Image (cartoon, rainbow, N blue to C red):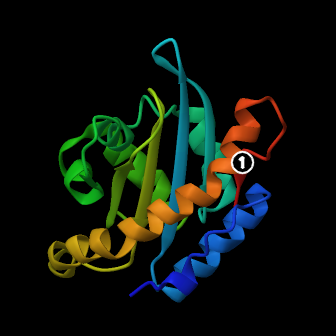
Amino acid sequence: MLTNHDHSTMSFHTMEEATRFLLSAAAAQQVRHLSYWYLQYQDGAPNQVIWAATYDPAYMNYYMSKFTPLDDPVINGVMENKFVDWAEWYAVDHLAQQMNTVAHKYGLTRYGISMPLPAPGDDKIIFSVCMDCNDEEWSHKRGILAMRFLPFAKSFDSRMRCLVEADQHGESIFKLSA
């Protein structure tokens, strides 16, 4: 169980600090990866993306060069304010299967969830958790993962708001960090 000590209320000052925190939390909670997306919208389309994750930076660069959040079926599901089970998407969506093949090479598993968080205006916030397990374990663990990480995700988002606001005001922050 994540405790209040695990997620302080102090704002992050840099993307590197936020990423270090995610890396530490993933290790402490024995999950493979954690990811936070903040998609800023302007005129109905994503204008700016902030992404902090524990993923391999090479994967994050590959992803951003080959896909956009709007292409990603998992992110699209979450952007409709739906909780998304990655394994379900990978079972039925061709693009998700292609993305999974590449992601697997960089240490991401198909056993993950993505959940929407409340965002101001038209902006979208997505928090994801993935873990190592098998098909039999996954149906039980995904619900537990959601309950366990939703409070953590909300706290992490509140700590990210200073960086989001800095980015919205044109201040340089490191966008891709791992």
Q: Observer-nearest residue: 111 or 100? A: 111
Left or right: 31 as drawn, with respect to 166: left
Task: Find disc 1 in the rendering and name its residue.
Answer: 163
Residue lying at 60% horizontally and 70% vertically, measured from the top left: 22
Q: State the SS at label 1.
A: helix
Residue lying at 46% horizontally and 63% vertically, measured from the top left: 153
Amino acid found under the numbered disc labelled 1:
Leu
Query: Percent position (x, y) of residue 11?
Result: 70, 61
Query: Percent position (x, y) of residue 40?
Result: 56, 30
Residue lying at 39% horizontally and 53% vertically, measured from the top left: 100
Name the image quarter holding the C terminus: bottom right
* Residue 27 in sight from this viewpoint: no
Residue lying at 79% horizontally and 47% vertically, measured from the top left: 174
Left or right: 130 as drawn, with respect to 159: left
Q: Residue furthest top?
A: 43
Q: How many marks?
A: 1
Query: Percent position (x, y) of residue 21?
Result: 66, 73
* Residue 13 in sight from this viewpoint: yes
Q: Residues within 10 Å of mark 1 (few under 14, many from 20)?
A: many
Name the image quarter holding the N terminus: bottom left
Q: Residue furthest right?
A: 172
Tell me if residue 139 comes above or below residue 161 in the rendering: below
Left or right: 159 as drawn, with respect to 3: right
Tell me the quarter of the picture where residue 54 sits.
Answer: bottom right
Query: Percent position (x, y) of residue 26?
Result: 53, 78
Tell me if residue 133 comes above or below residue 127 in the rendering: below
Q: Observer-nearest residue: 9 or 90? A: 9
